[in-house]
Amino acid sequence: MKDIRIGNGYDVHALAEGLAMFLGGVRIDCPFGFVAHSDGDVAIHALCDAILGALAKGDIGKHFPDKDDAWKGIDSKILLSKVCEMAATDGWKVGNADITIALQRPKLAPYIQAMRETLAGVMDIAADRVSVKATTTEHLGFVGRGEGCEVWASVILIKE
Ligand code: MG
């Protein structure tokens, strides 16, 4: 049997008016976006943490500190590709990824397929190995009040 590793990641970002929203590597058309040092793509951040978790190499804040101007406003797809490079250096490739996004609005259904294809492209795997699911929280909690977005990600890494 191939050697495998499992990892999980979690991230939250606050929402604010007038910022561009990026989620799962895709630009979302809405009047608010995520407060962040990077482009605020909370889904990619959770995915990066899942991969780093599987590698037991800390978290995204350790590798791309928000004190470092090198990462200011950066496209989070670049962070994901760097994390995948770290995995590849040790002989690992993402087997599959499963991402759950909790956001009250806007509805993400029109963007799900583009997110799957975009993330798969960055990770250099087939899109049918990437699952993106979205839910509201039925108006409960900070997500339900429209104050932020919460994302969970799980991955399996396979030794090449
Ligand atoms: Mg983050």
Image (cartoon, helix red, strand yellow):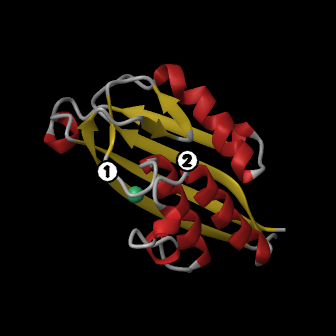
Q: Taking 156 as reference, is 135 above or below it?
A: above
Residue 50 position in % (x across, y down): 52, 63
Q: Quadrant of ligand 1?
A: bottom left
Q: Taking 113 as reference, is 125 above or below it?
A: below
Work out which residue is located at the far front of the displayed protein and give it.
69
Q: Is residue 10 toward the left or the right of residue 158 in the image?
A: left
Query: Residue 154's mark?
Result: none
Residue 17 position in % (x across, y down): 25, 33
Counting labels gives 2
Q: Which residue lies at the image location 76% right of the left edge and 73% below the top edge?
A: 3
Q: Is residue 119 toward the left or the right of residue 73 in the image?
A: right
Residue 64 position in % (x across, y down): 50, 70
Q: Nearer the viewer, residue 17 or 123?
A: 17
Disc 2 to disc 1, C-alpha distance:
19 Å
Q: Which residue lies at the image location 41% right of the left edge and 35% below the top edge?
A: 21
Q: Is residue 80 toward the left or the right of residue 46 in the image?
A: right
Which residue carries the number 2 mark? 98
The crowding category of the residue bearing disc 1, from other C-alpha atoms within 10 Å (few below 14, some 14 to 19, many at least 20), is many
Question: Disc 1 on helix, strand or loop?
Answer: strand
Q: Nearer the viewer, residue 48 or 34?
A: 34
User: Image quarter for residue 91?
Assistant: bottom right
Mark found first going from the N terminus, 2 or 1 = 1
Depth check, mark 2 against mark 1: the one in front is 1
